[in-house]
Image (cartoon, rainbow, N blue to C red):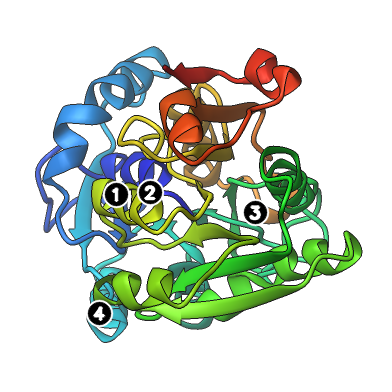
Amino acid sequence: MNRRDLLWAAAAAAISPVVRAAARGRYVTSLQPLSSCEETEKLIVPALRAALVQQRLAEIEFENHCFGNDFALAERIMRDAIRRGTGAMIVGGTPTALLAKRVATQVPVIAILGDPVNAGLTHDVRRPEGNITGFSNTRPETPSKIVDLARSVAPGFKRLVIVGDADYPEMGALLKPLERAATAANKPWTTRLVKASGFDALFASLGPGDVVYVEHALADLARLAAMALQYRIPTINHDREFVRHGGLLGYNTRTANVSIRQVTMLDKLLKGVPVAQIPWELPDDIYLGVNLKTAQALGLAIPADIRLRATQVVE
């Protein structure tokens, strides 16, 4: 799950003050694995406020919690919200959704995460199971698209190095679809789970023919881009800001008009529509970013078809 999606999820609970005595059923709790919720106020909140007004839901009260990677704290927050009668929850990321599946079994939950099928939350996105539905930020074909990108931009591509955040629960499971895609494309791969401080050692251990894909929740994008260039390793990241910071390629998918769609889903749940009748929504907006200056520095020629398809080109 990328940072922008986490911000959208967190902002849904930042649009009004914390309410300790809200009417049962009209009080919604948000839990997000972000170190701070302050960024949501600037980037996302205005669109969500507008969506609530448009949907005539301005009376809904929200309580927002950002807990970093402290999932013991997240569980305490979740249990307290249940005790106080929260009407629904909005959660960001697979580990938080799995926690809600275990702890908040009687509360409807909207999750924004990677792949709900791979995470074990449902067998079919069209038929949610248990108490959780929401928004997937990946499509079934996304992993194979990433492998295809690596093959297209790096003619000497020999191995895909898949990098995940060692401090993020369930990260190993989240990377399995990309491992399977690399296997299906007959490309060797290795998965490395590292801490944010471990990027130097990681890149120093790589060599010609390696292409890196980073699904690293806590990565400093500017530092990541600089190291990839220093060690001359073609690198792909899911964050849309990576290319702007000097990264070679960015690729991800997201849901367009997510503020309206998230509020619409929440309205249904608060009105008692069963979770099973609200299908998971797949992303319908594809982002492909290319930094031509970085490609030139790495001695790579970006194919014309990729430049034409790119939604962001940095020259």
Q: Tell me the distance, in whole angstroms, between the alpha carbons under discs 1 and 4.
A: 29 Å
User: Disc 2 vs disc 1: Cβ atoms closer than 8 Å?
Assistant: yes
Marks 2, 4: nearer the viewer: 2
User: Does the image show residue 108?
Assistant: no
Marks 3, 4: nearer the viewer: 4
The quadrant where residue 185 appears: bottom right
Task: Describe the element under mark 3 as helix, strand or loop.
Answer: helix
Marks 1, 4: nearer the viewer: 1
Residue nearer the viewer, 121 or 277? 121
Residue 168 locus on image (x, y percent): 39, 75
Q: Tell me the distance, in whole angstroms, between the alpha carbons under discs 3 and 1.
A: 44 Å
Q: Residue at x 77, y 45 (%)?
A: 148
Residue 222 locus on image (x, y percent): 25, 46
Residue nearer the viewer, 23 or 266? 266
Which three-letter amino acid code belongs to the residue tagged 2?
Answer: Leu
Q: Tell me the distance, in whole angstroms, between the alpha carbons under discs 3 and 4.
A: 27 Å
> Disc 1 marks which residue?
226
